[in-house]
């Protein structure tokens, strides 16, 4: 009976070995952490974009739906959304137009400001967000299954420490 072997080194190990020779003062452990996080982020982002494309959404549209999902009563103003998503008013208008044509959001007059507009998530918009987010969560769970639950918990704790250091040093 043949046993399956798993490699103990990834493609980053070879790169780090070369870098270590070229830059003897380089801390290859630190560089390995950064390279692997960047590589995982890139792959996770590509998987998310693939999932969103399968659900007829762009990453930017999905982020807007996420913002509305987190807003009180699934409603916000275009200005608040622009600020949260760091978009110009023109880019926000284009994104809102596309989502409104698709029936995923609705714009209506702001009852507390005669000149204002509110944007709200529609039932189909909520459904699109739930379905696409669930589909991506399934893909992510398959990837995370390479780690035991204990290892997942440990990794979360370690990554949290790194995130807290960034938040402490840059204010958020």
Image (cartoon, rainbow, N blue to C red):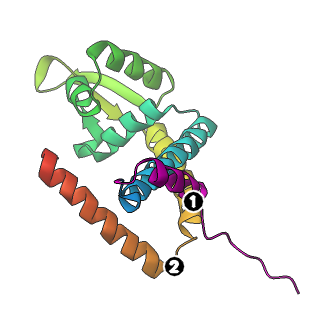
Identity of the residue drawn at 43% across and 23% down: 100
Identity of the residue drawn at 34% across and 44% down: 69
Question: What segment carries the magenta color?
Answer: 1-25
Identity of the residue drawn at 40% across and 30% down: 105
Expressed as whole percent of the image width and height from the top left, the position of residue 55 reads 59, 39
On screen, 71 above or below 140? above
Q: Is residue 114 left or right of residue 117?
A: left
Is label 2 in a helix, a strand or a loop? Answer: loop
Q: Is residue 100 left or right of residue 162?
A: right
Disc number lying in front (1 or 2): 2
Q: From the image, tell me which residue sits under label 1.
A: 138
Looking at the rendered structure, which numbered label has been put on residue 148? 2
Does residue 110 appear anywhere in the picture?
A: yes
User: Front-most of 148 and 136?
Assistant: 148
| 22 inside magenta stretch | yes
On screen, 12 above or below 82? below
Expressed as whole percent of the image width and height from the top left, the position of residue 109 reads 23, 21
Lower sequence index among marks 1 and 2: 1
* Quadrant (top left/top right/bottom left/bottom right) for the N terminus: bottom right
- Between the residue at mark 1 and the residue at mark 2, the CA separation in whole angstroms equals 16 Å
Is label 1 in a helix, a strand or a loop? Answer: helix
On screen, 91 above or below 4? above
Expressed as whole percent of the image width and height from the top left, the position of residue 49 reads 55, 38
Most distant residue in the right direction = 1
Identity of the residue drawn at 11% across and 21% down: 113
Q: Quadrant of residue 56?
A: top right
């Amino acid at each position: 009976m043949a046993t399956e072997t798993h490699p103990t080194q990834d493609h980053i190990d070879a790169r780090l070995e070369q870098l270590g020779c070229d830059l003897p003062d380089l801390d290859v452990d630190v560089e390995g952490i950064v390279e692997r996080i960047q590589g995982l982020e890139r792959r996770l982002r590509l998987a998310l974009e693939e999932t969103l494309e399968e659900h007829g959404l762009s990453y930017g549209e999905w982020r807007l739906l996420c913002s509305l999902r987190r807003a009180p009563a699934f409603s916000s103003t275009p200005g608040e959304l622009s600020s949260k998503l760091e978009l110009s008013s023109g880019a926000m208008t284009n994104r809102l137009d596309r989502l409104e044509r698709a029936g995923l959001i609705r714009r209506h007059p702001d009852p507390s400001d005669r000149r204002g507009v509110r944007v709200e998530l529609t039932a189909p918009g909520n459904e699109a967000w739930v379905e696409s987010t669930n589909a991506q969560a399934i893909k992510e769970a398959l990837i995370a299954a390479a780690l035991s639950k204990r290892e997942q918990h440990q990794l979360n704790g370690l990554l949290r420490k790194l995130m807290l250091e960034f938040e402490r040093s840059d204010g958020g």
